[in-house]
Amino acid sequence: MTDPTPTLLPARLSQHLPDAAAAYAAAGIAVFPCVPGGKRPLTEHGFHDATTDLEQVGAWWRTHPGANIGIATGHGVDVVDVDVHATGTGFPVLRALQQENLIAGWGLAVRSPSGGLHLYYPSSPDSDARSWSLSRAHIDFRGTAGYIIAPPSVINTAHWQRRYEVIAHGRNPRPVDSAAIRDLLTPTPAPRTMPSTDRPGRDGALEGLVEWVGTLTEGNRNAGLFWAACRLAEAGLSHGDSYALLQPAAARIGLEAREIASTIQSAHHTTALNPDAAESAPIVGRSFAEMRR
């Protein structure tokens, strides 16, 4: 099989936006202009107008020399977008993704102005991976029908002005399995024999939930434990009671003690903040910086 990896970003990138936009286009990466200091497209059809045509790119940035650079994803480049918001961060979920070997293969790591992270991957030539968003997990995937703001673009707010910055280059980049990431972050519901409408305070339903955690296999262990802990929290059990019930089953399926404790704690915290968000909230873990040590 031939190597599908394109040049994810030009080897040398000017901090001058018109020059950087031309460099992207020359490297075969389709770009389009966005409002200076923001993310809104300036073109009539948004990312659909993205092009590698140097004449058109030059004309756009002569008209708008301060325009940010948008890259249309899904056509050579895909991006896993880890968000940082006042309501939460997607960094904790990266530990689970790393443990399942789902984020390996990135070619470029870009720090976003908010302190988030964009991991760039080559698009797969064999599949059409569409964009999706898991807002409660603070993780997005930018593939077909999506776009990303690229370095050295600048975002302005009332409090600061910051650039998108390249912080690391990966080795041997390869396409990411975006469907597997989405599946991992969407816990499998409990079986019909123990419907989620049962109150876990009932002995039979509670035992069924604990037994179900003990059947989880690699690839869904963290998410399943999180889901179960959310159900117990919703039923009114304390954090300590949930831990006492779920810890033995979680340990039997191979989760580490620290991982079990942090996942159950996060489930109770998430449920307390927003009960409606619990079923699709993220898993707890280490930051991207810790993973790279």
Image: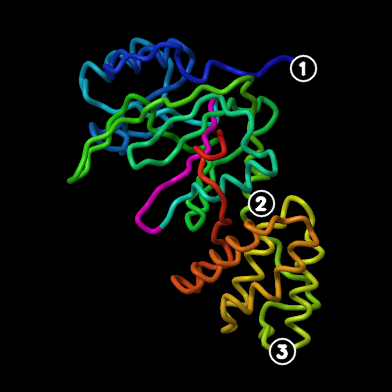
**Numbered badge on residue 1:** 1
Secondary structure found at label 2 = helix
Residue 206 lies in what quarter of the image? bottom right
Q: Are marks 3 and 2 in contact (CB under 8 Å)?
A: no
Q: Quadrant of the C terminus?
A: top right
Say left or right for 26 vs 21. Answer: right
Q: Considering only order in the chain, which callout, 3 or 1, is on the residue closer to the N terminus?
A: 1
Secondary structure found at label 3 = loop
Q: Which residue in the protein does label 2 denote? A: 184
Tell me the CA gap for discs 1 and 2.
28 Å
Residue 79 sits inside the magenta stretch: yes
Residue extent of the magenta highlight: 76-87
Tell me the CA gap for discs 1 and 3.
55 Å
Q: Which residue in the protein does label 3 denote? A: 202
Frontmost of labels 3 and 2 is 3
**Numbered badge on residue 211:** none
Q: Nearer the viewer, residue 286 or 14?
A: 286
Q: What amino acid is labelled 2 in the image? A: Leu
Report x, y in % for residue 162. 27, 34
- In this picture, is 111 found above or below 168? below
Model colouring: rainbow
Report x, y in % for residue 275. 50, 74
Q: What amino acid is labelled 1 in the image? A: Met
Q: Considering only order in the chain, which callout, 2 or 1, is on the residue closer to the N terminus?
A: 1
Frontmost of labels 1 and 3 is 3
- In this picture, is 165 found above or below 84? above
